[in-house]
Image (cartoon, grey):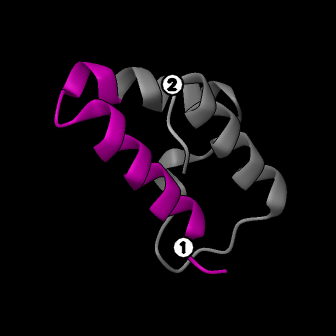
Amino acid sequence: MKGLGKAMIDKLFSLKAKNDPIVQNSIRVKLILKGIPVDSLTASSVEDESVLNNIREVAKTFGVIV
């Protein structure tokens, strides 16, 4: 599905960070350390299941279900 990874990351940012740039940056760093190319995901990019699973795993550590 196109853009699912981007949508999941956006949801994680909105639910957990709530416009706090420090929290958003810590989430971004954790995603990057898991190998997720946060800046290159777009609404038209197609992600494989391993990327989506990594996003779910990071979201879970922050107590959010995406």
Name the residue: 70% across, 30% down: 34
Q: Quadrant of residue 18?
A: top left
Q: Where is residue 61 shown, x and y percent of the image?
A: 60, 23
- Disc 1 is placed on an element classified as loop
Task: Look at the picture and state if 7 lies above or below 29.
Answer: below
Q: Which residues are magenta?
A: 1-24
Q: Which residue lies at the image location 59% right of the left edge and 74% below the top edge?
A: 45
Query: Mark 2 sits on what residue?
Result: 62
Query: Which SS does the magenta portion mostly show?
Result: helix
Q: Position of residue 42 (x, y in %)?
A: 48, 68
Estimate the x, y position of residue 50 in percent, counting from the top left: 83, 51
Disc 2 crowd, CA 10 A, few/some/many (<14, 14-19, 20+) = some
| 50 on left or right of 11 | right
- The disc labelled 1 sits on which kind of residue? Gly
Q: Quadrant of residue 47?
A: bottom right
| CB contact under 8 Å: marks 2 and 1 | no
Amino acid, disc 2: Phe
Q: Nearer the viewer, mark 2 or mark 1?
A: 2
Position above or below: 21 against 10: above
Determine if the magenta segment contains residue 38.
no
Q: Earlier in the sequence, mark 2 or mark 1?
A: 1
Q: Position of residue 9 (x, y in %)?
A: 47, 50
**Residue shown at the point (67%, 74%) measured from the top left:** 46
Please, what secondary structure does the residue beneath circle 2 have? loop
Write down the residue under mark 1: 3
Q: How many marks?
A: 2
